[in-house]
Amino acid sequence: MTSSVLPALSLYQPWASLIASGHKIVETRTWRPHADLIGHRMAFASTGTMPKEAKDALRHGTPGFQALLDAAREAGFEVAWDKRKLIHNLPLGKVLCTARIAGAYPMIDAAAAAGEVPERCLLVAPRRLLIVRPEGDLDVSHQRPYGLFEPGRVAWLLDSVRPVVGDHPAHGRQGVWNWRPSGIFESLQ
């Protein structure tokens, strides 16, 4: 598959690789994707560095650290701590996969919503995350360790994840940016 330009989003590791491996199907943001991205493919890249907060998320004792470590290891990556240094083989600064943005859902507090639940939203409860949509509700509670689920944020539901084949560098961009792939770049799985 070739394309002249594909919208892309860069994420810190390990979250970028968790999308590529299919573990993370909900990306959380403070903003909605542009309307023309819904229903279309987007590339996901890893940032060139892992900031302290990303490393801290993988440190023993932080909330959700074990789920992140387990998912990264299940995806085939080595992630461990050597004294005070994170040792890993997560790819940095690379386009890793494409996925279709299946929908964007504002997050609302389940208790505050009571009977006034919008037609499309993600209900945030202490033990449950539920995407409410006309085609059927979707329980995504298993996604809690992979994102920041708070009322006021937006959940991007991803599907049809395809790994990117070859080496495709990504260079320091924030927000949605344009990726110009060369040649065949997607696995057809």
Image (cartoon, helix red, strand yellow):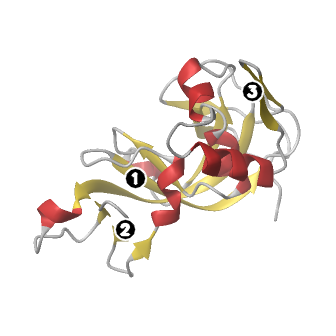
Figure check: 54 above or below 66? above
Q: In the structure shown, which secondary structural element does the residue marked by tag 3 occupy?
A: loop
| Residue sitting nearer the eye, 169 or 178 | 169
Figure check: 46 above or below 29? above
Q: Which residue is mark 2?
A: 131
Q: In the structure shown, which secondary structural element does the residue marked by tag 1 occupy?
A: strand
Q: x, y percentage for residue 27?
A: 49, 48
Quarter of the rendering occupied by the C terminus: bottom right
Q: Amino acid at mark 2?
A: Ile
Which labelled disc corresponds to residue 155? Answer: 1
Residue occupying the point 38% across, 44% down? 34
Q: Amino acid at mark 3?
A: Leu
Residue lying farthest right?
A: 166
Give the quarter of the image for residue 21: bottom right
Give the quarter of the image for residue 43: top right
Which labelled disc corresponds to residue 92? Answer: 3
Q: In the structure shown, which secondary structural element does the residue marked by tag 2 occupy?
A: strand
Q: How many marks?
A: 3
Q: Residues within 10 Å of mark 2 (few under 14, many from 20)?
A: many
User: Relative to residue 64, is residue 149 drawn left or right?
Assistant: left
Q: Marks 1 and 2: CB-CB under 8 Å?
A: yes
